[in-house]
Image (tube, rainbow, N blue to C red):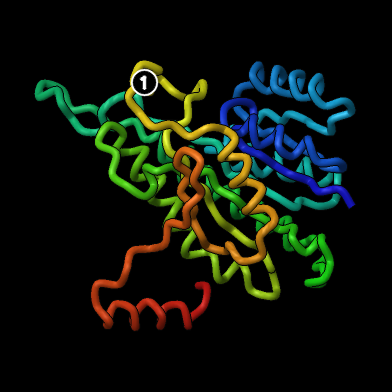
C-alpha cells in the first residue's frame, strides 16, 4: 500500500528537498503544506516535471493556526484513509531584536517565531498522532511496520546557543525537548510511532537571509539531509533521538549527562509515571 507523507514548509528549502526524496520512491503520495501559495504551486510544477506521474499535491496552510493545519490533515486523511509519515519542517526566524533597545518606547516583542516553530510543531505532532493511530498496526516482520514516523526539522541552534538568533534558538531548543520527552510514550505498543529529529548546521537555502555570512561558515549539503531522512525513515530504534548534521556527518546528539545521581533517579521516576 502506498505511503502518505505530509511535509510542512515543503514548498522550498529543506522541505522541498524532502519532497524530492519521497517522490523518488514509487507509490508515495506527497502533500506539501505551506502558507506561500505561489511557492507551493511552483514546487508542485517543478516536482511534477522532474518525476513523471508524481503524486504530489499542495495545500495552502498556516502551521501556526490549529484550524488551518487541522483542515489540511483532515483533507489528506479523507482522500487516502491514512497518514503514514509527517515532517514538521516549517520554521522561521526573528528579524528584529526580542528585547527592548529603544529607551524612549517600549515595544511588545514579535513572537511569530514561537507561533510557527513551537506551536506549529505541537499542532503537527498532535494531528499526526491522531490520524496515525487510525492506521492498522502491522507486524514487526512486515515492511509496513516502518511507517508511523514523525520527524521534526530542528537546527544546530536547538543544541547550542546562537547569539544572533536567541528566539529562534529558544524555539529549536523547545522542539528538541519535545522530541526527547515524547520518544518513549509514542513508541509504546499501542501507538508504535517513532518521533525523531535532525538538526542541520548552516544550509544555504532561500531561507538564508545573508549569503555573505555563509562564506565564513562550514555548511551542510542537501545530500546529508537526504541521508538523514533515509536513516530516520528506515531505522527502528530512533524514537526520541536527535541527530546533528554537519558537513557530511550525521551524529547522534544525546541529552546532557546527569550532573547528580539524584537527578538521574528523579528523571527515571518521572519516566515510570508514563505519559501524563
Residue that appears at 28% across and 44% down: 161
Disc 1, SS: helix
Question: Which residue occupies 40% across, 43% down?
Answer: 156
Describe residue 106's horizontal placement relative to residue 269 as left or right: left
What residue lies at 59% left-to-right and 53% top-to-bottom? 125
Q: From what the image shows, is residue 33 above or below residue 260? A: above
Task: Using residue 265 as the reference point, say whether residue 52 is left or right of it.
Answer: right
Task: Give the x, y percent position of residue 48.
Answer: 81, 23
| Residue 115 visible at all | no
Question: Residue most toward the front?
Answer: 248
Camera-side residue: 109 or 4? 4
- Tell me where residue 255 appears, x and y as whole percent: 38, 63
- Please name the residue that numbered disc 1 is placed on: 215
Residue 36 visible in this rendered orientation of the protein: yes
Residue that extends furthest to the left in the rendered view of this protein: 103
Residue located 84% across and 30% down the image: 54
Number of numbered labels in the structure image = 1
The x, y position of residue 262, in whole percent, is: 27, 82
Residue 141 or 166: which is nearer the viewer?
141
Few, some or many C-alpha atoms within 10 Å of disc 1 (few <14, some 14-19, many ≥20)? few
Which of the pair 142/74 is nearer the observer? 142
> Is the residue 98 above or below the residue 119 in the image?
above
User: Compared to 11, does 31 lie above or below?
Assistant: below
x and y, in percent, of residue 231 in the image: 63, 52
In this rendering, position of residue 140 left or right of residue 90: right
Q: In screen coordinates, is 262 left or right of 182?
A: left
Residue 90, quarter of the rendered image: top right
Amino acid at each position: 500500500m502506498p505511503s502518505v507523507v505530509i511535509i510542512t514548509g515543503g514548498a522550498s528549502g529543506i522541505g522541498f528537498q524532502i519532497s524530492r526524496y519521497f517522490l523518488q520512491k514509487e507509490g508515495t503520495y506527497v502533500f506539501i503544506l505551506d502558507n506561500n501559495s505561489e511557492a507551493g504551486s511552483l514546487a508542485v510544477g517543478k516536482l511534477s516535471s522532474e518525476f513523471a506521474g508524481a503524486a504530489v499535491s499542495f495545500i495552502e496552510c498556516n502551521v501556526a493556526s490549529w484550524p488551518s493545519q487541522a483542515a489540511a490533515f483532515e483533507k489528506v486523511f479523507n482522500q487516502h484513509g491514512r497518514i503514514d509519515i509527517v515532517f514538521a519542517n516549517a520554521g522561521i526566524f526573528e528579524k528584529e531584536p526580542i528585547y527592548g533597545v529603544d529607551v524612549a518606547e517600549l515595544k511588545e516583542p514579535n513572537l511569530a517565531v514561537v507561533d510557527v516553530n513551537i506551536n506549529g510543531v505541537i499542532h503537527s505532532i498532535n494531528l499526526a498522532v491522531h490520524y496515525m493511530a487510525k492506521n492498522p498496526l502491522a507486524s514487526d516482520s512486515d515492511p509496513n511496520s516502518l511507517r508511523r514516523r514523525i520527524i521534526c526539522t530542528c537546527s544546530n541552534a536547538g543544541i547550542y546557543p546562537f547569539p544572533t538568533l536567541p528566539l529562534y534558538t529558544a524555539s529549536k531548543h523547545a522542539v528538541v525537548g519535545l522530541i526527547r520527552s515524547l520518544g518513549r510514550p509514542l513508541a509504546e505498543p499501542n501507538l508504535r510511532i517513532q518521533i525523531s529529529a535532525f538538526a542541520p548546521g548552516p544550509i544555504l537555502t532561500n531561507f538564508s537571509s545573508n549569503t555573505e555570512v555563509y562564506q565564513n561558515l562550514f555548511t551542510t549539503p542537501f545530500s546529508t539531509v537526504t541521508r538523514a531522512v533515509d536513516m530516520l525513515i528506515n531505522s527502528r530504534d530512533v524514537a526520541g533521538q536527535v541527530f546533528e548534521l554537519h558537513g557530511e556527518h550525521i551524529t547522534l546528539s544525546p541529552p546532557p549527562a546527569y550532573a547528580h545521581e539524584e537527578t538521574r533517579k528523579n528523571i527515571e521516576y518521572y519516566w515510570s509515571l508514563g505519559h501524563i
